[in-house]
Amino acid sequence: MTRYGMVIDLRSCVGCQACSAACALENQTPYWSNKWRTTVKDIQVGQYPNTGRHFVPTICMHCKEPACMTVCPTKATFKTDDGFILVNYDTCLGCKACIAACPYGARYVYSKEDVQQDKEIYGDNAQHTKVHIDKCTFCQDRIARGMEPACVSTCPTTSRMVGDLDDPTSAVAKAVSSGLAKPLRPDLGTEPRVYYIY
Amino acid sequence: MNIINKKWPFLSFAKNPKKRYILSGAGPSTDHTLTTRFSAVEPNPNTKGTADILFGFAQGFGMTDRLVQTISELNGMNLKALQEEIGKAVKGQQTYTQALRNVSFEEHAKNLGMTADKLEQTLREKGVLVIESASKMREHATIAKDLPVPTPSGRIEIYSLMLAGFTMQQGYHPNWDPGLVYIPPQVNQAKKPDEFNFVYGKTPTISYASTNANNPILMALSKVKEDEFMGLWINPQKATLLNIKTGDTVTVENLVSGQKAQIKAFVTEMVRPDTVFMSSSFGTENPLLKTAAGVGTAINKLIPYQVEPIVSAFRSQEFTVRVTK
Amino acid sequence: MANPMHPERQEGYEWPVGVYLFFGGLGGALITLSYIFHFFAATVPMIRLATLSGLVLFAIAGVFLIFFDLERPLNAIYSLNNVTKSGISWDVVLIILNFVFGILFVIPEFSNYSIFSGLASLLAPYQVFFGLIAAISGFLFPIISAGLLAAPAAIPLWHTPALPLLYLITSFSLAIAYLGALFSPVGTLYTTFLGGIFALTALTFAISLAYLEHTHNGPIEAKEGMHRMLKTPRFILLYPVVGVLFPLVLSAYLFFTGATLTWAMLALTIALFLGGFAARNCVVNNGIETYPWPY
């Protein structure tokens, strides 16, 4: 079984936010409410004249030990056989315990107004027909068709890479095993599957 | 410096190409290359290609022939071929954009010893056709390295006969000095504490000046970082002095033209203390652009029309501004 | 690691959660107290009122949570799916236990009403047992519900055992003051009530200091959250001053001097109510997300 992981190279991200746009289109996320499954943080450092900017794409980490799954009272947040963390839109209660529990800020509410707007824009092709807590699904439909997630294939600087963490020849596995790519806040015990090079 | 045998200047007809687009070099690459654009989606039927718009104007002025002649002279395109294709466009058999494209393709294809269709197919497959690499061209098409330059100074001397002609007609002016002198920017160097240099630039989410500001997703992404993208960047040293915080509405006044505009401040280390920066991407007031209308501040409100007479540079950062809260 | 230049308030929990924690905690404390009174010669009305008030508060708390906070209230039927791990599932279990066993416990207290007499006599032999379950559930509710906030590590301001303890203790101190205000106990009972309020408020004071220490010396997001709270005049007035120091001083004075003031219990109730509300509302509003980014 493939153990998908993602590596995001912060050295080459230019903060264009094409990933946010591609994800919004692919997954019909509510850009009209300023809610995104993946965002790019724009962090300024230093003082003039020694200033700099770092761009940090954020995304659901699809953790091995997800805090969001522990707190979910209805088990709407569940783990697939491949290890992806998904939300069952039918049983989600909307209690937002998962939003508070996620240390990476990966989740948001797909509200009633957002569902209505989704229907208005996409009509019969609307993907979100029920109110729920939404987050990155690693583009499951695309993965099933052998494609990369939308954010990965659109990135113009190839800052995002996906691959099988268990395949030692894959770029992501090499980046992780060499220690070049690191998870964020490993002390929290979530064991993310998205690693960052910085 | 490379002197290339044939130079095909880039005609930037940037709107909706129907099928083919005219050929050009591959941007900053110094190889002798050809590339083109192919449309990815069908254009909006309510739009026209830039060539069609320009020819529309020319027809209105009764100057179609003159335009055809100018294009031929400036681009080196065969006049007869151009006239034939444009003639078809005049009769409505094809668009002007298509006409120019056809001429461009035919001529390049002929030079390369292939048909226009073969050239198109090659470009579709390869993207960029390298006719001759820069290193190869350097072997036969450059001034020999060790040849001394036969000038009084022994260096390459640049002198423009055209500008010398202007001088003879109009008298001397630094703008048309045949020796291309440096004209310092007209910016006040001795600035008061609330006076700044003015610079502007783009945002990552909006291309060109403000072309796609009306795109709802791109506007939504711009609003995620609204402070930074739509604000006036001001250094904290000056911001503290002027009691300005991020989010405060400030008035920016062009001290040369007197133009004023209001904008929200964004205090950041990313700009020099003597300079303010804003984006050129926002501020349209066209009510038909429902997403973008009224969002942000337009640089047009601050930049006067003071075009440089020879190359039409806008001199759009050649003034100082006063920022007040 | 965290960058205090970019603190972001958590988005999940807003004011309904504060109300839920407050009323639910108070309800649980009242039911637990009513069970305790059962053994200590308290009057029947006190037990009745304590239990019924507790149940009403649980109902209001539950309503607040379900209808004001949940995005899909009707899916509440699935909320027991994760009783092994989810704090909310535990809360739902506790609420159900409190309701069911609280009602079963209090019915025998209404044996003098003819419509209840039959049922009361049926339940009376088991009253202590029902009451025990209700009391344990009631006692656990303030702790477990605060565990919603405290358990995940994502919000450092909340991630401390001090918070559940604080909410537990303040629930009980307010419950005692509330009952005292309604029943105006005299003599030994009065002294006991005052002693209870004093002891619990002293504990509240101590735990608040420990909580302050946790935020001051803990992760920077916790410090930032606490600073925001301390910059809110409403919080400063309602919690440390009105909610802790005033009751502490008043109850200490009355307990150690033996003086009686007719308005004391009412004043303590109001003070502890306002303080309790501020303690939950302000904490919920100022939880700052942990900052995991590398710059």
Image (cartoon, grey):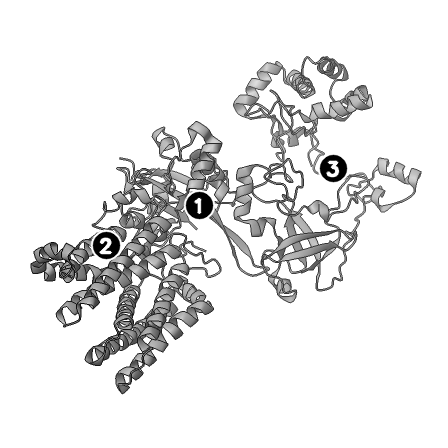
Q: Which residue is mark 1?
A: A9
Name the residue furthest bottom.
C257
Tell me the chain of label 3. Answer: B
Above or below residue B300? Residue C283 is below
Tell me the chain of label 2. Answer: C
Same-chain status of marks 2 and 3 = no
Image quadrant for the N terminus of chain A? Answer: top left
Name the residue furthest front.
C114
Q: For the residue marked with disc 1, what is the amino acid? A: Asp
Marks 1, 3: nearer the viewer: 1
Q: Which mark is residue B147?
A: 3
Q: For the residue marked with disc 2, what is the amino acid? A: Ile
Relative image position of residue C282 (x, y in whole percent): 40, 63
Disc 1 secondary structure class: strand
Q: Which mark is residue C95?
A: 2
Disc 2 secondary structure class: helix
